[in-house]
Image: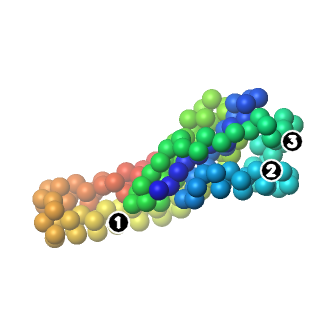
Amino acid sequence: MVIIYAIWCDVNQKHYIGCTKNKPQKRWREHRCLLRQGKHACKPMQSDWVKYGERFFHLNPYIDQLCWSEEVVLKRKMELAWMDHFDEKGLLYNRKLSFQPPPDAPAKAAAADAALAAVAFTAGDVTKDTAATIAVGGACTKATAT
């Protein structure tokens, strides 16, 4: 399971969105450790941590959950979708810090869709028409579309 989480500040309602395969509480401890030492990579959140204090920051550990079987690109797309949600409201700390899919991700996703379609058709799990649909715009390709 991959969990998309948020750290938010009560004072200004700004959010830091992250994704972890570990327990969210463990990731929260790591963030707090960096913030307490003044070493967090997200400088705006670090600044507010110093300004307002630790007691005004909280973890929402389960904004979204994804299965392990989901493609990495889809996981990151979901994380970015949550970032966009808060960024549109001016309530996001970490817009520039998240993973961005590499430029070749759409091509790799299309190849993965084609391979998936071929295996499914060969195994008799889908019809030829369904396999063709998967190959041209299956789940992997849709996950990398801009």
Q: Which mark is residue 49?
A: none
| Residue 80 seen from this side | no
Q: For the point 22% across and 68% down, which residue is it? A: 118
- Report the mark closest to the observer, 1 or 2: 2
User: Which residue is identified by label 1?
Assistant: 112
Using the rendered view, name the quadrant where residue 37 is placed: bottom right
Under circle 3, the secondary element is helix
Q: Position of residue 17 (x, y in %)?
A: 62, 45
Amino acid type of the residue that numbered disc 1 sits on in the rendered structure: Ala
* Dots 1, 2 in contact, CB < 8 A: no
Residue 10 position by quadrant: top right
- The residue sitting at 16% across, 66% down in the picture is 121
The residue carrying mark 3 is 50
Q: CA distance from mark 3 to mark 1?
A: 46 Å
Q: Alpha-carbon neighbours of circle 3 within 10 Å: few (<14), some, or many (≥20)?
A: few
Mark earlier in primary sequence (3, 1): 3
The amino acid sitting under disc 2 is Leu
